[in-house]
Every structure is written in C-alpha cells, then in structure tokens.
C-alpha cells in the first residue's frame, strides 16, 4: 500500500462512520441493485459509481461509506477502487479532461492536443488548475480510434476530431456551465447501391 | 472478393431509427427469437439452435476467433440451477471501436442474439459488461433493455413462451484487463479484475462457480441472422474458413477512418485505398497493425494480395484480432509507436503474474531509452530476450499481447531501431 493511501487513511473520521451519506432514495436503489446478482459483493462497482457520481470522488472516506452500506470489508472496497482507473481516489477538478494518447490517437496528434491543453491551462497532465475547474489527464485507449484525436469529459461524453479551435470551444462551453453534446458518428457507407452517405440511421 | 461494393450490411443496416424497438421489429427484428421459441418443427429444442450456430462457424469477434456455437456446446446439461451468459462489451484493445456502433445503432439485434443464446444454453441471467468509459452508450443500452422488458422480450415468459431470462447491464470502471474473459467474471463479481487460472473453464465453473459462457457483442449480434436465414446463408458471406460479416474498424493515417461492415476476407489494400479512401495527404503506406495493438505489425510490402481473415493473416505472420486495423504512413516513427504500445500494456498489466508485471515495465523502460537515443543495439536483443521470458508464462494472454508487438516490430523494422541506437560497447554476435 502506498504512502499516499495511508496518509489518507489517517484522515478518516475518528468514530468509524463515514462523513458521507447516501440518501434514502439511493439506499433503495442499492437494494434494487442487489436483487440483480446472487451475491452482495457484485454491486461493489455499481455502488462505487453511484458514490463517485454523488460526491465527485471515492476517497477513503467514501470507500468507507460504500463498505459500510454493503457490509463488506473496507479493504475489499479499497482494493477494488484502487484497481480501476476511472474511480477518483482523491478529489479532482470540476471537469476532468481525459485526453487519449494511445495508439491511434498517438498517430493522429493526441500528444499535440495534450500539449495544447497543458499550455492553455498552465498545468501538466495529472494536475488540476488552481481554481479547481479543470483536471488534465493522459488516458489510455478510449475506443474512439477512428475519430482521433479525442478526449472524454469527466468520465462521460466523448469529444472527437479535436483541433486547437475545437478544444477552445469545449473549454468555453464547460466554463459557462454547459456540457458538450454527444456526437453521433454514422458509419460511412460503402455500398454503391444506396443513395445515402452514411449507414446506421439516426439516433432519435 | 468482387461483391463488396454491393454488399448490404446486416449487422448495422442503413435504416433510420433502427435503435427504436418498433422500427427494429418492422424490419424483421425478433422474428428469429419468435421462431426459436414457437416454431417446433424447425427448432424442436435448444440443442437444435446450438447445432445451427455451430454449423455457421461464427468465429469469435472479440479476437480469439473461436467457433461460438462450439463454445456454447461446452456448457454442461442444465440442472435447474443458475447458469450465466456474460457478454463482453469491454472493447479496450487499442484500434478497436466497433461494438459501440451496435450499442448505438442496432442494440436490439445484440439483445435478441443474447436472448437466443440464453435460450440455447438454458441461461437464467445475461450479464452485459460494458467498459465504464462508454457511459454514453450504456445509457443507450439502458433505454433499449428497458424497452425490451416492457415489450415482454426480456424477463418472464418471453413472447408468451415458458422461457424466461433476465438481462443486467454492468459498467466497468477503466481496466483493459477486464476484456479477458475470466477477469471480466471477477469484475462482474465485484472484485479486482485478476484473470483466473484455467482449468476450470468458465463453462464448468464461471460466475459464482456456475456454468458460464462469455461471448463478444458482435459475435452475439450475428446470431439472429443465422437463425433467420440459416447457417448456409451465413457461410455464403465472405471466406469459407472465417465466414460472415465483419465490423472493420479502420483508424490512423487514412482519409476516411471509421467502422465499416463488410464481408470477411476483404483485401487489406482495398480496405485502405477504396473503403477508407486512401492515405491521408497522399502519403505512402508504411505498415498496418491488422486487428488491434497486440496483433503483429505488417510492413506495406507484405500487404499486396493479403486478405482480412484468420487464416490469411496467420499465414502472413499476424492475426485477425478484433479487425481494428491501424494504418501508418511513411512518416510514422515506428520506434516511438512501439514504445507507446508498450506503455499501454505496462499500464494495463494487472500485476498478478511476475513475468507480465515486471516484463511490461522493462519493455516500456528500455524502449523509452531507445526512443530518446540512449539505447544500444544490445538493448534490442535484451528486449527480444524479455519477450521470450514473458510469452506463455502467465495466467492470461496479456503478457503475450504485450510481447508480440515488441518481438515482431523489432524483427520487421530492425534497421529503424538500430538507426536509433548507439553501437554496443561489446560487439554483438
């Protein structure tokens, strides 16, 4: 276990109960989740997601809440949270920018986009802006290889075909409280018997 | 292959609004499930469904290329206790971005395929594992699953039959290893995604110790077509040894990257020059990685007359993988590209087996040394030696997936690596 984790552990609340709480509605939702699996442990990932969506992170104090809610050992929840990269083990900026620099994005300028964001935000990958607005991260393949370079916003929407101009627009949007729309990218058609330019229909 | 231009897609046909249940059903959707449940003459029992799918030879589209129906037949006889189907939508191999197209454009095709599979194997619950990063697509699937339940296509007494099955969506949380089938099971059980030792195989002891089959999303999406049109129809598409439609994901330095549905066995050069409309900026082709980052790189000179199917690619010294083809032009720095691939596998190694945990780190570090001009020619041999210490020595195939790119990229582009290296102080060989 890393030094960092034990430091966090030292800041856990003294009386053994988590400083965070799920709402009544969330507890009811967790009960429904449990019915979908034969063992309680299986809801560890979904409940960690629920916690992160609610509190913005799953630091050790939130992990304790999850463990106590599910009556599982804290060590189990901690081990799971540590294993998966999408769980934030410490608070992050309001918007987390995951810039893909893996194979196809690396070939198509992903590093340039990361560098542009580093300059623009004045931070390095892995850091958060002093105003707490943006955390910049370098991500492994996000499965948008044909639409490189791209980034994901706070574990949610993908923004594809990035250029510096598009990055500027997205940052402005986020700063003004908007979220970029989901970009539906149709499959290009190859058949010469069809008049349409793209397959896949529309997402209505 | 002369008919690709007139090929009409069947996995993701060009029909607007196919992601809506009524549109899907209007175009023959759920006819296959209905037939399986009610047409006693054609489908007397679940075993007849398994037999037809086995006959079709749908080779697993997640990368392993194993006959899906044959895999189904490994399930032990039903004993009234729970049995599971785990659908692999983890889709994390760099270069692969196809299954999300099914989630987005034809979700019911996959759900119908999974439901037929469940019937064929007497499955009690279907779990669909989707990588956590695909949150937007998970939301689309939630809507589709909910609509299928409302229409009596999932849950109790499906389509008025005595067959019942539940379908549960399960989000990952960022771990490439969870695409490995036993790691996926661990993750579904709420644990760290450590692959399991095989045997026992999942068909004997899978989720919660019960018989489980794991299939890729695209694989299952081929099932309704096989049931509706027969195994012979399926085998008439593409090449004999690896039949059926393929979702080719083309990325990298081409004019029109994207996912294309075409028959198996497409000529590589046709995919690049005609389907993806050629190289970007008129550059020359240097190499491709044919089916995701773990499949060995092929230089341009080996691509003439090469087709995209398991046998042809094996003959050429690579693999079909996920059919996620990464295209590289003449300006590509092969050494740096390999370093980036190795960095990925180091990041994604789960750390359970020493040869992988340590080996992937060494590969990345030594390649970083070579990329920055600090390497010597002996480092290249050290890299090759490490790969031989990794391959086949671990619980799962991640170590192999990390080792192959290093082994084959160095052997096929050795001059470019040597040009980056300082001469060894001790003469080699």
Image (spheres, rainbow, N blue to C red):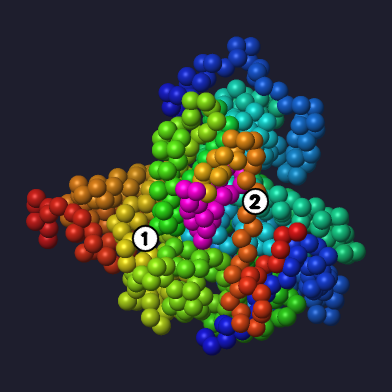
Judging from the image, mark 1 belongs to the subunit labelled B
Instruction: Find the magenta span and give its range.
Output: A144-165
Name the residue nearer the viewer: A95 or A11: A95
Measured from the top left, where is residue B336 in percent x and y?
Answer: 32, 54
Residue at 57%, 17% (x, y): give it.
A12
Secondary structure state at the residue bearing disc 2: loop
> How many tags in the picture?
2
Label 2 belongs to which residue? A182
Please state if B130 lies on the left or on the right of B47 as rendered: left
Where residue B365 sits in the image (x, y, percent)?
30, 45
Q: Are marks 2 and 1 on the same chain?
A: no
What residue do we see at 49% from left, 56% from top? A148
Picture layout, residue B349 above or below residue B122: above
Look at mark 1 in the image and give the residue it sits on: B404
The answer to whether B157 appears left or right of A137 in the picture is: right
Nearer to us in this view, B364 or B249: B249
Quadrant placement of the C terminus of chain B: bottom left
């Amino acid at each position: 276990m890393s030094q960092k984790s034990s430091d966090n552990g030292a800041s856990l609340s003294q009386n053994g109960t988590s400083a965070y709480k799920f709402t009544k509605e969330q507890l009811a939702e967790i009960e429904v989740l449990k019915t979908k699996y034969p063992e309680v442990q299986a809801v560890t990932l979904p409940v960690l997601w629920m916690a992160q969506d609610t509190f913005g992170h799953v630091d050790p104090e939130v992990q304790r809440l999850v463990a106590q809610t599910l009556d599982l050992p804290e060590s189990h929840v901690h081990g799971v949270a540590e294993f998966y990269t999408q769980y934030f083990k410490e608070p992050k900026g309001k918007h987390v920018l995951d810039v893909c620099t893996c194979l196809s994005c690396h070939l198509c300028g992903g590093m340039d986009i990361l560098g542009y964001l580093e300059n623009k935000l004045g931070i390095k990958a892995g850091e958060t802006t002093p105003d707490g607005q943006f955390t910049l991260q370098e991500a492994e393949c996000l499965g948008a290889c044909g639409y490189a370079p791209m980034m994901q916003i706070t574990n949610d929407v993908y923004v594809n075909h990035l250029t510096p101009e598009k990055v500027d627009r997205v940052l402005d949007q986020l700063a003004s409280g908007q979220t970029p729309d989901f970009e539906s990218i149709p499959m290009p058609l190859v058949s010469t018997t069809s008049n349409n330019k793209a397959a896949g229909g529309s997402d209505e | 292959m002369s008919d690709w231009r007139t090929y009409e897609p069947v996995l993701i046909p060009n029909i607007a609004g196919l992601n809506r249940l009524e549109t899907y059903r209007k175009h023959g959707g759920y006819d296959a499930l209905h037939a399986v449940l009610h047409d006693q003459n054609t489908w007397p029992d679940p075993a007849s469904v398994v037999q037809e799918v086995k006959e079709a030879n749908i080779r697993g589209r997640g990368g392993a290329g194993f006959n899906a129906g044959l895999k189904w037949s490994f399930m032990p006889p039903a004993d009234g206790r729970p049995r599971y189907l785990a659908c692999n939508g983890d889709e994390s191999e760099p270069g692969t971005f196809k299954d999300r197209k099914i989630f987005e454009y034809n979700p019911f095709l996959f759900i119908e395929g999974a439901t037929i599979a469940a019937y064929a194997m007497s499955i009690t619950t279907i779990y669909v594992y989707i990588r956590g990063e695909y949150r937007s697509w998970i939301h689309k699937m939630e809507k589709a699953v909910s609509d299928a339940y409302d229409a009596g296509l999932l849950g109790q007494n499906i389509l008025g039959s005595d067959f019942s099955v539940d379908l549960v969506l399960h989000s990952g949380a960022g771990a490439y290893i969870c695409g490995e089938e036993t790691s996926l099971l661990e993750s579904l059980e709420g644990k760290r995604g450590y692959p399991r030792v095989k045997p026992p195989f999942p068909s004997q002891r899978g989720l919660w110790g019960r018989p489980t089959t794991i299939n890729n999303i695209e694989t299952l999406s081929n099932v309704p077509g096989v049931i509706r049109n027969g195994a012979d129809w399926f085998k008439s598409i593409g090449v004999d040894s690896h039949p059926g439609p393929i979702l080719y994901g083309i990325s990298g330095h081409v004019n029109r990257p994207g996912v294309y549905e075409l028959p198996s066995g497409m000529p590589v050069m046709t995919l690049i020059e005609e389907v993806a409309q050629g190289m970007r900026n008129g550059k020359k082709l240097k190499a491709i990685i044919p089916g995701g980052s773990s499949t060995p790189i092929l230089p341009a000179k080996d691509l003439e007359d090469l087709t995209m199917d398991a046998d042809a690619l094996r003959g050429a010294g690579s693999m079909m993988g996920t059919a996620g083809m990464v295209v590289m032009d003449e300006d590509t720095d092969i050494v740096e590209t390999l370093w980036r691939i190795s960095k990925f596998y180091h990041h994604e190694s789960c750390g359970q087996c020493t040869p992988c945990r340590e080996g992937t780190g060494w590969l990345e570090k030594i390649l970083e040394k070579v990329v920055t001009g600090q390497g010597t020619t002996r480092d290249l041999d050290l890299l090759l030696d490490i790969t031989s210490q990794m391959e086949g020595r671990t619980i799962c195939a991640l170590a192999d997936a990390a080792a192959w790119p290093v082994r084959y990229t160095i052997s096929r582009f050795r001059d470019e690596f040597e040009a980056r290296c300082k001469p060894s102080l001790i003469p080699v060989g």
